[in-house]
Image (spheres, rainbow, N blue to C red):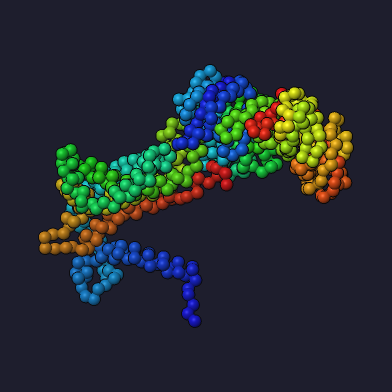
Amino acid sequence: MAAVTIRKVRKVFGKVEVIHGVDLTFQDGEFVVLVGPSGCGKSTLLRMIAGLESVTDGAIDIGGVVINDFAPRDRDIAMVFQDYALYPHKSVYDNMGFGLKMRGASPSEIAERVKEAADVLQISHLLDRRPGQLSGGQRQRVAMGRAIVRRPRVFLFDEPLSNLDAQLRAEVRIEIKKLHQRFGTTIIYVTHDQVEAMTLADRIAVLRGGVLEQFATPDAIYNKPASKFVAGFMGSPPMSFARLTASADGKTLAMPSGTVLPARGGLVMGGLSGDKSYDAGFRPEHVKLGADALPGGVNTTARVEILEPLGAETLALLTVGGAVLTGRFPPQAGVKSGDEVTVSLGAADMHLFDTETGRALVA
Amino acid sequence: MMKFPSAKKMTLIAGAVVAINGFFPALWILFTSLKTESELMRLPITIWPAAPTLGNYTRVFVDQPIFLFMWNSFVVAVLSTVLCVTVSALAAYALVRLRIPAPNVILSVLLAVAMFPLISLMVPLFSVMRDLQLLNTWWALVFPYAVLSMPVCTLVLISFFQDIPRDLENAAMIDGCSRIGALWHVVIPLTAPGVFTAGILAFVNAWDEFLLALTLAPRVASRTLPVGITLYQGEFSFPWPIISAALIIAIVPICIIIAVFQERVVGGLTSGGVKG
């Protein structure tokens, strides 16, 4: 186990800079998820930690040692790849034992460690098979087994679930969480799936265009997003936004329709400039059907555009005072598309963002 | 209205034409090797030997040290094949995987080298081998044969290496291999069909080559089979049946090698390692 520190790391491919000086510190034994849209640099950052990409500038430190110039094999890491990357010409046993064999482990030690890992992952019955004879879920388990037999200081996961179907993804996600609880090894996990990020991580690093947007716990990422991008990226369905204008005294905000919301609750009071526009973000659970449905909420009229019944709840796409917001409605709400309804906007839970920088104004 | 034959029939016809074109000369040589010289010269020409004889084969071994020629050919072909495939594999890997400048230019030059007429290389090669005092040694042929087969072997291997997912090598490097180790433990086993194809090409080229062998290693002790076979002809005679028998003997090792390695030249090894 080891802590990992990334200091002002930059990565340039030709003339394109894909990582712009990222600073991150992962604690020993922490489960960190790097998340962001395609092309944000999360996989590149992971591959730099693995040693599969060089570091243009800055330093990567594992367990207090800068490993920029170390070969991948000397970093004491293990990696699980998106496409499994199992050796097709080797059996499951040989796949799992290959890393130990390369490090000069004795056959008896290899057998013991492979058996132990196979038992943990419930793949003992597959040891004689080749990867081509396994299902996707089994292959991913073998890939994880190959990583854990080595007992490395850091596990790296590069979108390991993206090739699995939804049900299998949920199962393997739980397996990964169990593995972390069992071994307590530092895990750095890359995904573009924010559900994976929220459910697995101790802390989440949200990247965008090679820049770190926010590095915080899932709770903080969800409830205190540092930017409009983070707010819109994390959460399912995502936060929806409305452009509001502050009153001259900066104490209220008005929607284009004229609905007035108090600038209160978690907002930095007095921080609003009069007559300036702000992007206000509402989580779906803060847009409720019915007058006074939310304590301290502001009632307003909305038009139901689209309903998405999910069983336990119904997601409603609403036009509210010129803005399009998503609300969480009860399953049997008795409304249909085109209806005019009264909704309660959770003004106290509203997030405000600067329209130019996108940074949050909430403390 | 005229009806075109089906695609299957067309394939069969085309296959038959190619097979006959390839096998007929070999069969003709085989039948000739079993005939007496007088039968061969008789008119009308016979296809099947009227009185098959193995006497020509006996003469092959009696008239010239053909085992020595075969041994020389075998050693030269094996050494040049090993050298060629090793260097070609490294070159192909570098061109496919490493960030080297202008790989396409290098590939074009490689192709251009492959087109070079052998005759234009004879004098410089002779001069170099003489200066290195390698004339009439196996090495006088091993090095040129390896180099001459390298372009085509590299091109063959490039096409196979390109199909190997990069993450397999990355996984090997994280598991403890160096880059060369990943090539040896992962890439080469997975591209075995390509490696054997390149090897067979290099081996056959070396086994068949005549011009360089005649120029660089003409002495009996280092003579290879293609040059050795020409010794069966006399100043005023051309014993076709004996030469045909020698040719059949020369073909046999190639047939054995191809038959042995053909089983290895099968695709599908890479299935299952990655998604899909």
Between B95 and A171, the one lying in front of the other is B95
Which residue is at a point 28% across and 44% down the rendered structure image?
B147
Q: Position of residue B257 (x, y in %)?
A: 35, 50
Q: Nearer the viewer, residue A16 or A60?
A: A16
Residue A45 image position (x, y, % from top left): 54, 31
Residue A319 in view, yes or no:
yes
Residue B132 spot, x, y in % from top left: 18, 38
Horizontal side of A118 relative to B149 (left or right) equals: right
Q: Is residue A347 left or right of residue A69?
A: right
Q: Is residue B175 left or right of residue B80?
A: right
| Outermost residue to the top | A64
User: Horizontal and vertical percent for residue B78?
Assistant: 30, 44
Residue A285 visible? The answer is no
Q: Tell me the quarter of the picture where residue B52 sits.
A: bottom left
Query: From the viewer's perspective, is residue B233 above or below residue A85?
Result: below
Looking at this rendering, what residue extends furthest in the left direction? B235
> How many discs mark residues in the rendered view?
0
Residue found 76% across the figure and 23% down from its top? A269
Which residue: 64% across, 26% down? Answer: A215
In which quadrant of the rendered view does residue A203 lie? top right
Instruction: Using the image as rendered, state which of residue A168 and residue A259 is in the foreground.
Output: A259
| Residue drawn at the location 49% of the way across and 68% of the way down | B7
Left or right, residue B123 beside residue A149: left
